[in-house]
Amino acid sequence: MTDNLWNPEDHIPLHIKESLSKLSPNYVLAFFNLVQSLKLQKRTGWLNNNISNPESISDHMYRMGIMSAILKTPNVNTDKCVKISLVHDIAESIVGDITPFDVKIDKEEKHYRELSTIKYICNGLIKPYNTTAAQEILDCWLDYEDERSLEGSLVRDLDKFEMLVQCFEYEKSHNKQMDSFYDCVPVIKNQEVIQWTAQLLNERSKYFNI
């Protein structure tokens, strides 16, 4: 249950907050500086599993963007999938990477914080410079979050698949199995991504002889 107390502006890094407090703020630079935090934040799931020097949030989004670019699912706008992939976790630049296993923040509160944050980013930082881009980024985020388009739903599957690819890479490099990450396999819906996942699972079964 959300407490409705989350205010994105309270959690902006100090140097960005100071920049925005100037008489004529450079909103574009403030936004780019905020995106920098996605390059620095390590993904929580890997930290919780003691993976040394794990990927950042932006690492994850980048490979999803590449995956989106080579999709051949009929009637899918791959350009839109790339855009959704590149912005779907952008609210984490302020909110952080909250996992389903976080006992302090439930799903409703997570959604509230991320929705409040993406609206702040789009309307407070991007819109003063480019109204069209602000709306497009917000729409892409909502397409993903609410699965309100074919592309949004597909990218949600890519989010899971990219995690599985990364998991298998870490399993090999750290010589340990992390079976819990594969619980998401049954909920992947797109046939192309299902096929990719089946191939990955086959490779993993051979590697671990399971």
Image (tube, helix red, strand yellow):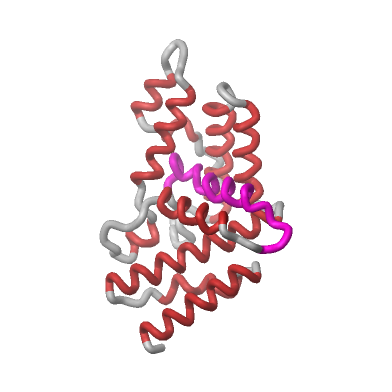
Quick one: quadrant of the C terminus? Answer: bottom left
Give yes or no for residue 181 being in the magenta stretch.
no
Residue ID at (38%, 55%): 43
170 with respect to 124 (left or right):
left
Above or below, comparing residue 74 to residue 183 in the picture: above
Give yes or no for residue 90 being in the magenta stretch.
yes
Residue ID at (57%, 32%): 122
Q: Position of residue 6 (x, y in %)?
A: 50, 38
Residue 157 at least partly seen = yes
Residue 70 figure quarter: bottom right
Q: Position of residue 172 (x, y in %)?
A: 32, 74
Above or below, comparing residue 33 to residue 62 in the picture: above
Residue ID at (38%, 40%): 37
**Nearer-the-camera pick, 76 or 152:** 76
Residue 207 figure quarter: bottom left
Q: Position of residue 200 (x, y in %)?
A: 48, 75
Looking at the rendering, the stretch of residues picked out in magenta corresponds to 73-96
**Nearer-the-camera pick, 86 or 42:** 86
